[in-house]
Structures are given as C-alpha cells and as structure tokens.
Amino acid sequence: MKLNSYQEKLILFLFYVLTTLIAFGVYQDYGIHIEEKFHRLNGLYWLHYISNLFGFSEIENISEIKMNEISDFSLSSVSRYNKYSVLLDLPSALMEIVFNIKDVKTIYYLKHLFSFLIFLTSSLFFFKILQLRFKKFFFSFLGLFLYITTPRILGDSFFYKDILFLSFFTFTFYFLIKSIYKFNYKNLLFFGVFCSLSLNLRFFAIIIPIFFVVAILIRNFNTAQFINNLKKIFFYILCFFISLYIFWPYLWSNPVNNFIDLFLSAKNNLVDVKIFYNSKFISNRILPDTYILNWIFITTPFLQTIFFSSGYLYCLFRFIRRFINVRDDVIQNDLWKSNSEKIDCVFLIYFTLFYFIFILLSAPLYNGWRLVYFFNFFLIYFVIGFLFNLNNIFRKKNKIIFFFIFFILISYNINSIIKIHPFQSLYFNSLLSEKIKNSYEGDYHGIATKHFFEKLLNDNNNKIIKVAVASHTPIQRGLEAISEESRNRFIIVGQEYNQADYIFKNNISEVNSYLIKKYQIPKDFHKIYELKIDKIVIYEMFKKIKN
Amino acid sequence: MKLFFYKSILVLFLFLVGFHYSFNYFVKKIKSNIEENFSKEKIEIIKDKIKKEMNVAIDKDNFISKEDANLINRFLDKIKSDLN
C-alpha cells in the first residue's frame, strides 16, 4: 500500500493531535521532581539578573521577592551552581510573573507540559531526518512512534531535564544532516544556533561542533573548494559563539573566562555519591565500563535493543569494510558510497564517539543512564536502519512479517506505557525478574512522593502528620504537588524517626546502606503499604506501632 | 592525504581505547578495591567494632590472662632496659 503525500500528512497531523490531547489529559498525573524548586529558582535568578541589567525594575522587584520566598534547607545556591541552562527556566519564570501565576503547582505542571511539547516537536525533526535518510513513510513513522513511546524517555519527557537535551540534540542533528546535504550558509546558521543551545543544556555537546569542523576540514583538505568551505566554517563558528553568548546570561559578565571555567570546574561540580547498581552500592566515580550499555539493555524494550544492536553492528562492519578499501586516488572508494550511507556514518561515528568519551573519561553517571538519554536518538535510528535493510533484503516476500514486527513494537510500547503510568521513567524491560528489577536504583527524582502524600491524606484524618525519610530523597519538595491546604498538614522530620508517625522509603541512598544504617527502619515501625508496579517497588510506607 | 588523516584518527582512537583497557582498567580496579576496603563507611564500621570490643574488655573481670600479662610485662621491661 503506497500513500500519497496528502495521506501521509494527514496521518502525521492526526497522530500529533491525538498525542497532544493525551498529553493535556495526563500531564498532571506525574509527580513533582526534586529538582523543580532549584530550576524555578534558577529561572528567577537569571530573570532578576537580566531585568536588573536592562532596567526592568518591576520584574526585577517581583523576581527578587519570589526568590526570597523559595526556601528549602536542602536546596543548592543558584549563585554557586549558576551554569545551568536557562532555556526553559527563564521563559517559565517570565511567564510566572507576566501571567501572575500564584500556585507553585500550576507553574511546575505548565513547565512539564511545555517540556513535553518541545519533545513532541523534536520528534517531528527526528521524523524528517528519517525521511531524508530512508525516504519511506512507514519506517519514518515507526521511528517517530518509537522515539516518543520508549517508556523511560516518555516518562522523563515531562521533567525537562535530560529529555530537553535530547530534544535540542535532535534539532541540532537535523540541521547537521541538512548541512551535510547542503553545505550552505542558511543551514550552517541554524546548525550553529542549535549547537549552542545544546551546549547550553549539556556541556559535552561541544563534541558536535568540534567533530563537525574537524571532519569538514579533513574532507576538503587539498581540494578546490577548501577556501570557500573554510569561509563557511568560520561563519558557522561565529554563529555558534554569538548564539551561545546571546542565549546564556552566564557568559555575559566574562564570556571567555566563564566559558573556560565551565569545563575546568566540571570535575568539582559533578556528583560524588554511592549508587545502587546490581544489588551493590558502588561509587559513581568508579563505574564499570558496561554501566551505560547494561542500563540501556535492562530499561529499553527487548525487541528495540535487539534491533538496535543488529543495526549498529551492521553499520559498524560496513564502515570497517569501507575503511579497509579507502583509496586516495579512487573517489568511489570512500567511507560511504551514497548520501544515505554518509548519514549512517555520521550516526555511527557520533554515537561511538560519545559512548567512548563517556567511558574514557569515566563519566560519573548516576540514576541509570538518564544523563545519556540522548542516546535514544541513535538507538531508534539504528532500529529503523536495521528494519529498513532487512526489508530491502526480503523485499516484497514477507510484507506480513514486517507489519507483524511493526505491530509488536508499537503495541508493546503502548501496553508498557499504560501499565506503569505515571511511572514510565522507572520502566524496566519486562523480561527481567522481580529481583533484577529491584536491584537497581529507582525513583531518584522522587516523583512517587505525590502518590505517597495523597495516600496519607486519604488514609489519615490527623491534623498533623509527621513523616520521616529513610532514603536520600528530599520529600518535602514533593509536597508542592499537592494542594496548599494539604501541604500544611505534613511535617517532615528527616531521619528523626522517633518523632515520626510514618516513614517514606525508596532505594535511593547516597551511602552504602548495607554498612551505614542511617536509612534503617526502626523496629517500632511496620510496613503498611508498598507501591509496586510491574514488579518494581516504587516506594514503601511504614507506620509507627502504637504501644 | 585523506587516507593519512583517516588512519591517524584511527590510530589515535585505538591508542586511547587500548590505553583505557590496559592502564586505566588497572587503575580503576585498584581504586575500586581501595574504595571497597577503605571507604568512609568501612572505616566507620571498624571504628564501631573497636569501640564495641573495648566495651567488652572493660566489662570483663580479667581481660588479659595472667600468662599474657606476665609476658607483656617482661617484654616492656626488656624494651625499657634496652632504651636505657
């Protein structure tokens, strides 16, 4: 069945309308994550800075008042951790003031919605990349669908941290591919701007422009277009730095020093904690080399990982074969034989490069592979690449098998998403046993705290409820997910278990909990509830035994 | 020229990977052994254990047997005499 362009657009349109409607229906089901307060503060801090600089005294005053109202003993200071991106935080802070939004909960949920809508927009760019490469609507549409519905990615897409980077990474890559197809000033301008925005979110995005420039120089060295391309490269670098400067107020006071400091201070600012990994507490500074791959395999739908591995290995072996046959004097004997292969090579090289940089620099990751969720962009690409090549091999023979594979991939993801809603960000591969699923750290973001507080409110009539925490989760921040009136009923007593009526516990700990007993549940408490979804223990609730 | 660049990059990449899986791997292993045996948590546990043993010793009527006490005394006397 071949669809015409109008039908394809209609399917896309309907898909996006449906997805947006679903998002509007469910975005408030998710909890508030523990870093939202910091991000709100970050937005207000930079809004205050900018309004002070440009003389918007009213906004300056309001933002200052709002900043002073935000308090939390466990909150990091923004003036110290001032290198975070302002891409979503600053517009949100402005929106909060312009529309006079009083309820913190509304502010957070609006941010969640915007975060998802940005992610949804990026999926269209991913679809366009797949169309450029494969030129087959069904494959591109499947890629688009998997890009959005990979459970962990979808769950995190509302939390505007790692998925915001994935979204901007996708925009950047789209313009990278466009620049490779057409090396003109327009594409380079967009590529430069989006590169800077990605760098704004995660500093390791610096690899994209560096490798791009090096590759262009190597490819054009000693050729007739070298000087012309050199001019374009300069234009690109200029766009990149100007845009970086414009969109990042952190650089305004001292652009060069602050930019250098971004990389120099990285080592000191990185988190140094113990993480629960494969039933052991290990330091996140000495992670095993298999850490990222292991996490990807256990938290990505099984078929997706199989197709990804096959697609990646296929591209890698083809690349090695081409590499062996490269000759300077024969133009055809290059690393690729067509534009499509060239795109495959770009994906292969960038993915391998990023992966090995993380391994070689012993990146101190934590909370699974969330810092490298942008790898999902590559994962889905190789899944589609593999299916596309398989289809080319079998051609018309086994169309039904392909529809069956498409159906399985799509229905599996839909089923997983529905089954563990709204905890998709804690998804584990369904083939894993209960023991394995619970031998890795879980709800780092503390999104289950909303469920915990709501459950307590339902089950308890006490005016004041004292809650202790037997995990490294600042649950007081989760209180902002419930109504203001209900918030006042809770007193959080940290690890002062003797003062508490209830204890909240999940498996997040910054110390080795087998040795240090600070999160050990006292004997006068007993478990009254456990939220377990798809065999994953999300949190446990303990109540004091009355004498 | 293109070939030269490609090969140079490959050699650099292989060198880095080789370095990581030999030297870095060795360093990582030592680091994780140190982390495992001399971590803050382990030291705290050892400290607790020593304190516990000290308390046990205090509570006992005779912590050191007569024979051992005699031996230690003689040993200390010997050291004293050698130092003088």
Image (cartoon, coloured by chain):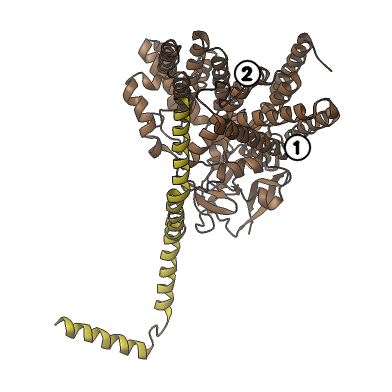
Chain colours: A brown, B yellow
Q: Residues within 10 Å of mark 1 (few under 14, many from 20)?
A: some
Query: Mark 1 or 2, which is nearer the eye?
Result: 2
Camera-side residue of B23 and A261 = B23
Q: Label 1 is placed on what type of residue?
A: Lys
Q: Quadrant of the N terminus of chain A?
A: top right
Do callouts 1 and 2 mark residues in contact (Cβ within 8 Å)?
A: no
| Image point (65%, 49%), residue name | A438
Residue of label 2: A125
What distance separates the C-alpha of mark 1 from that of mark 2?
Answer: 28 Å
Locate residue A291: give its quadrant. top right
Does residue A180 appear anywhere in the picture?
yes
Q: Position of residue A231 (x, y in %)?
A: 41, 11
Say if labels 1 and 2 share a chain: yes
Q: Is residue A440 above or below residue B11?
A: below
* Chain identifier of the residue bearing label 2 in the image: A
Does residue A103 appear anywhere in the picture?
no
Q: Position of residue A276 (x, y in %)?
A: 56, 49
Q: Which mark is residue A10?
A: none
* Chain identifier of the residue bearing label 1 in the image: A
| Horizontal arrangement in the rendering, residue A109 relative to residue A265 (left or right) | right
Q: Answer with mark 1 or mark 2, whichever residue precedes in sequence.
A: 2
Q: Label 2 is placed on what type of residue?
A: Phe
Q: Is residue A394 above or below residue B17?
A: above
Q: Position of residue A498 (x, y in %)?
A: 54, 54
User: Please, what secondary structure does the residue beneath circle 1 have?
Assistant: helix
Residue of label 1: A419
| Horizontal arrangement in the rendering, residue B25 relative to residue A24 (left or right) | left
User: Please, what secondary structure does the residue beneath circle 2 have?
Assistant: helix
| Image point (63%, 59%), residue name | A547
| Image point (54%, 19%), residue name | A176
Locate residue B31: give its quadrant. bottom left
